[in-house]
Image: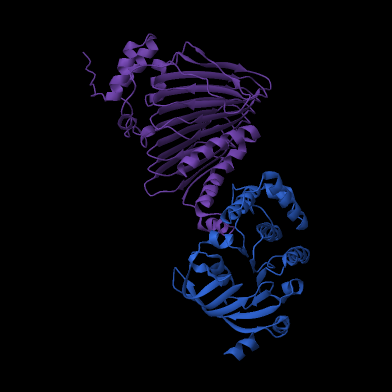
Amino acid sequence: MTVIPMIKHTAAEEALFEAYDASGAKSADRDAAIASLKTGGLPTRRIEAWHYTDLRTALKSVPAHIVEASSDAAPLVEGSVDLALVDRDVARGEVASDDAIGKLNSAFATKGALAMIGGSVSDIMELQANVSNGANHLSHSITFKDGASATVVERQLGEDGFATAVTDLEIGDNADVTYVITQQKDLASTHLGQINISLGADAKLTLFVLNAGGGLVRQEVNIKVAGEGADFQLRGVNLIGDDQHIDVTMDLHHAVPNTESEEIIRNVVTGKGKGVFQGKIRVAQVAQKTDAKMACNTLLLTDDGDFSTKPELEIFADDVACGHGATFTDIEPSYMFYLMSRGIPERDARALLIKGFVDEIVEDLDNEPLEQAIVGVIDAWLDKNG
Amino acid sequence: MLEIKNLHARIEEDGTEIIRGLSLSVKPGEVAAIMGPNGSGKSTLSYILAGREDYEVTEGEILFNGENILEMDPAERAASGLFLAFQYPVEIPGVPTMTFLKTAMNAQRKARGEDELATPDFIKLVKEAAGKLSISMDMLKRPLNVGFSGGEKKRAEILQMALLNPHMCVLDETDSGLDIDALKIVSDGVNELRAENRGFLVITHYQRLLEHIVPDTVHVLYKGQIIKSGDKSLALELEANGYADIIDQAA
């Protein structure tokens, strides 16, 4: 006889398990995912990947009922094409033991966007999920065929919701893709996102992640640079105020020779905001001539705010260029003096500098309407929190 | 217009006294030059006028149009019509030059109770002023001063001066780092702004700049005090004989 020691479940965990019991969609994989959560519970800081985001403690409650995600807000960029959410048979199979988002999503998700994109698409495509007053789980799968060129915006909206969203991106050889995740939920919302990417030969992906809302947020970015000549660019902006907790955790795997990657994360922390960036770069032994750079810059505006950054390099190849750096600064006094000496009042000068600090990396998108729309979201946040 | 009376100031951090009883006045329409050897307090004076926080005024006052500006923050001083052209303008990444110019112009207009500029009017003003200083619109699309050459930075300072239309212009070593051609463009820009109701305080090391921007008065600053004042011939005398004679006389 095997005795499985059961931990005492938290209120949030109980609510999740009850929701699963009531769920109409069950399968062996889903059962396994829930069973694994029942045994171990949600991850705590003792699980390394969750050290700075103790989900078990932080997640106080989960709405008991599942709601549909709506997609009827105006698109971020006018004229965007809607990527519809459809019923999907999501069979995620076995997920890693510390992959709590994968398990939750695997247990619950029955819908998501499903797209196969080829050729050169000039219109921006928007995948919108508004989760309000309930729980919702979506699993998206987007394949970019060889040589495709496209821009997709994944937009996370909602009030007082609990959501998981797992996106699988398959990017073919020679494809050129811009993928933007904007998360603008209210402070009562919990958002657990995960994007899993495979990047083909000579393909380029620019991934932009903007967090401008949400009470408890974790966005995981898992990427395998799988084809020679591939180029992965990540730009992240985390705007953190009130008592928000925002976590961006990246696991980047250079699996083949001659690939490039660069990550620039810019964080603005005010109020009692707490932020996390974990950036792990793994370079396989065969992945010679990898060129990987990572930077995490934080503007810490209050003493009560807090940001933790953890870079990790795991390099098995001997002929690579890998670097990382992290900075924490307050607003530069010489910049303030210069702006004020031109008649710009203190408050406006500060706002201009905070905006400049994050706007700088939005420019890397190299798509004017998209840049303007993102800057618009940033401005709205700064107006409210600056 | 500008009256500095018995000014004493020190570096806030370590208490080093830099300005030690400086008195000076500049009338409307006057171009006053301040010359002096390294370390005499020239740049410090410009920073104190503009209101930089790192200095503490321990004695004396600075009156600008009759008002004591020591109580004002840098933005209020600027809005009241004071402008400092920096010796080393800072590079501010992420802030586009045009956005900065518009914010500054509108902030000053707002402080004076005027309406904000409409975008087409603003662009027209900038184009006109930039053209005179050989500044391309491409340069103005870049982040503020970022990647500008030394000469471009100085021209951008004069552009700001022209657009902000101040009553009193303080130029801190505007000639440093300029080649002959750039010096001419910058000086022409300054000369064009000379007006009956506008004063200038031109801080410089060298007589060279004063050949282009001809001063009405010249003051020698040494160890935080004006030790000699005269007309433009004083600058020529300094150029020929150096500071030593005047310093000896004052001692």
Chain letter tied to blue: B
Residue A287 location, quadrant? top right
Check the image and report above or below for A332 versus A202. Answer: below
Q: Would residue B186 appear left or right of A163 to someone viewing this image?
A: right
Measured as percent of width and height from the top left, residue B170 is found at: 63, 68
Chain letter tied to purple: A
Check the image and report above or below for A1 versus B249. Answer: above
Residue A63 visible to an observer of this rendering: yes
Measured as percent of width and height from the top left, residue B199 is found at: 66, 70
Q: Residue at x 63, y 53 (%)?
A: B105
Residue A255 visible to an observer of this rendering: no
Measured as percent of width and height from the top left, residue B51 is found at: 53, 65
The colour mode here is by chain
Check the image and report above or below for A103 versus A236. Answer: above
Observer-nearest of A228 and B190? B190
Residue B189 location, quadrant? bottom right
Q: Residue at x 56, y 26 (%)?
A: A153
